[in-house]
Amino acid sequence: MNTNFDFLGELCDFLYPRHPYHGQFEAEYATFNAHLQEFSQRINYICSLQTGGKISPEEAYKQIHLLWKQLKRTKKALEIAN
């Protein structure tokens, strides 16, 4: 059973890679960085689905646009300056 746990952990690391934050440490910046990494990962999935013909370019655009709006709201909520 332990090997199954290791496999799931490795699979999760592969599917959802996280990289350490190297910028000026403030809680808002670290939180935004986590959201930015998730945004990047989701964009990658959407692009792959569209390239593979699983979703239309219009659907990909709509999903990316919604993710962008979400990221902008996150930035505004965290009160990060431009």
Image (spheres, helix red, strand yellow):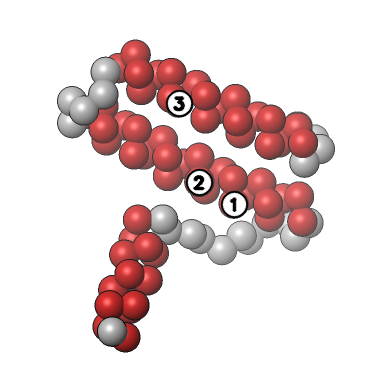
Residue type, label 1: Ala
Which residue corresponds to mark 2? 38
User: Residue 11 appears at what percent x and percent y?
Assistant: 31, 64
Residue type at mark 3 is Ile
Disc 2 element? helix
Report the side of 71 relative to 77 (left or right). Answer: left
Q: Residue at x 75, y 60 (%)?
A: 25
Residue at the spot 26% in from the left edge and 24% down from the top edge: 55
Q: Which residue is mark 1?
A: 34
| Quadrant holding the C terminus | top right
Q: Nearer the viewer, residue 78 or 19?
A: 78
| Nearer-N-terminus badge (2/3) | 2
Q: Are marks 3 and 1 in contact (CB under 8 Å)?
A: no
Q: Measuring from the top left, give residue 65's x and y in whole percent.
A: 50, 21
Structural crowding at the residue carrying mark 3, measured as other residues with C-alpha within 10 Å and reported as few (<14), some (14–19) or many (≥20): some
Cα–Cα gap, marks 2 and 1: 6 Å
The residue that label 3 is drawn on is 64
- Mark 3 to mark 1 CA distance (whole Å): 17 Å
Identify the mark nearer the N-term, 3 or 1: 1
